[in-house]
Image (spheres, rainbow, N blue to C red):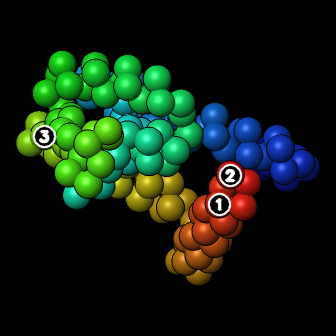
Amino acid sequence: MYYTNMNNAELLTNLLTDLQSIFREKNKNLPFSLSQIILISSIPEQGIDMTSLSKKIGIDNSTTTRLIHNLQKKDIIIKSSNIKDKRSNIITLSKKGVEANKSIEENVEKFSKQIFSYFGDKNRILTRDLLSAFHWNLLKYRLDNK
């Protein structure tokens, strides 16, 4: 296994690269870039304001605006005024966007099942638990480093 002697930086870089590659490959049936896929899959059902969405996916507001504009043209995103704060907009998925998100989720579910099938039952559970803990630590890191 080629990860054995890697330091943390190399491991995280390779993990990110491999995941991006798999996401692109397994979603190539969809007419979206990786950035658009990440944006679509990051919008909660109740919607999200643009600033929060930018922070959630780690890109600046101008990039988010451009991505949203392009997805509006494809009728994937609905942008509406925020009732609580008229200066901001709420982003939700259109009906077509919900279907696109469902396709993304199905694609991710397929390849994740395949990846997890390489583990035995005991290691599959351990790996899921470790990934869950890793994700939790990533969230804490992001909050601590704002």
Which residue lies under the disc numbered 2? 146
Q: CA distance from mark 2 to mark 3?
A: 31 Å
Whether residue 113 is visible here, answered yes or no, is yes
Q: Return the disc, 2 or 3, that comes first in the chain's sequence.
A: 3
Q: Nearer the viewer, residue 73 or 6?
A: 73
> How many marks do you count on the picture?
3
Relative to 133, say whether 54 is above or below: above
Indicate left or right for 6 with 55 as reference.
right
Q: Which residue is mark 3?
A: 94
Q: Residue at x 20, y 25 (%)?
A: 72
Label 1 vs label 2: CA separation? Answer: 6 Å
**Tag 3 secondary structure:** loop
- Closer to the camera: disc 3 or disc 1? 1
Mark 3: amino acid: Ser
* Real-space Cα separation, disc 3 to disc 1, in angstroms: 30 Å
Amino acid type of the residue tagged 1 in the rendering: Leu
- Residue occupying image coordinates x 26% and y 54%: 84
Residue 136 lies, in percent from the top left, at: 61, 68
Q: Position of residue 98 (x, y in %)?
A: 17, 45
- Vertical comparison of 61 with 131: above or below: above
- Bin the neighbour count of mark 1 within 10 Å (Cα to Cα): few under 14, some 14-19, many 20 and up: few
Instruction: Tell me the amino acid under the disc marked 2.
Output: Lys
Report which quarter residue 119 is drawn in. Answer: bottom right
Of labels 3 and 1, earlier in sequence is 3
Dot 3: within a 10 Å radius of its alpha carbon, few (fewer than 14), some, or many (20 or more) residues? some
Q: To which residue does mark 1 refer? A: 143
Q: Are marks 1 and 2 in contact (CB under 8 Å)?
A: yes
The answer to whether any part of residue 120 appears in the image is: no
